[in-house]
Image (cartoon, helix red, strand yellow):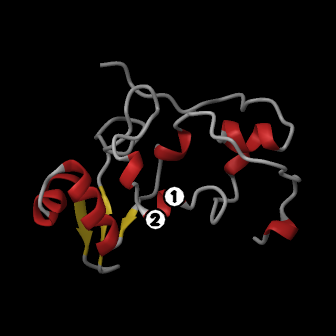
Amino acid sequence: MSTADWPYPVNEFKCHLCGNCCRGEGYVEMLEDDIERAAAFLGVSDEGFRERYCDYDRTEKMWHLIDQGDAEKSCIFLNKDNTCKIHEAKPYQCAGFPKRWRPENIMDFCAGWRAAAGLPPADEKRTMSED
């Protein structure tokens, strides 16, 4: 869907740190540059980063981040306060959300996108499990 086809006019996006873009179905593809940057940021080798934080999809022939194993399928790097542990070195896919790409149901979960469109927060919000 192009932005011209988008059903809501969006003026300016500001992240509200709801964390919903970092939870749920799907995955974050890790390009080689993403792996190198994130590994360097964390002070680990590229191989060590892959072993600890990634899974390889043989069908798609790509690396992707794993989740935390919680019911919400939270990204492995999502902190309890909805910030990213590797924000300074975040993957290209994450850096592109929501300006370069977004799912069609973004209005169902993204507080910042809804606010930019002049809408109130979503009725339901994905939340992290309490440990």
Quick check: 103 above or below 11? below
At a point 29% along the width and 53% down the height, the residue shown is 66
- Do the numbered discs 1 and 2 sit on residues whose CB atoms are within 8 Å? yes
Identify which amino acid the numbered label 2 is placed on: Tyr
Which residue appears farthest toward the top when viewing the image?
Answer: 130
At a point 49% along the width and 28% down the height, the residue shown is 127
Q: Which residue is mark 2?
A: 92
Q: Which residue is mark 1?
A: 95
Quadrant for the N terminus in the image? bottom right
> Does residue 46 appear left or right of residue 65 in this picture?
left
Q: Secondary structure at mark 1?
A: helix
Give residue 33's mark: none
The image quarter containing residue 5 is bottom right
Q: Position of residue 108 (x, y in %)?
A: 70, 43
Are there few (<14), some (14-19), or many (20+) residues within 10 Å of tag 2?
some
The image quarter containing residue 78 is top left
What is the C-alpha distance between the residues marked 1 and 2? 5 Å
> Does residue 85 appear left or right of residue 104 in this picture?
left
User: For this rendering, which residue is in front, 42 or 129?
Assistant: 42
At a point 68% along the width and 36% down the height, the residue shown is 111
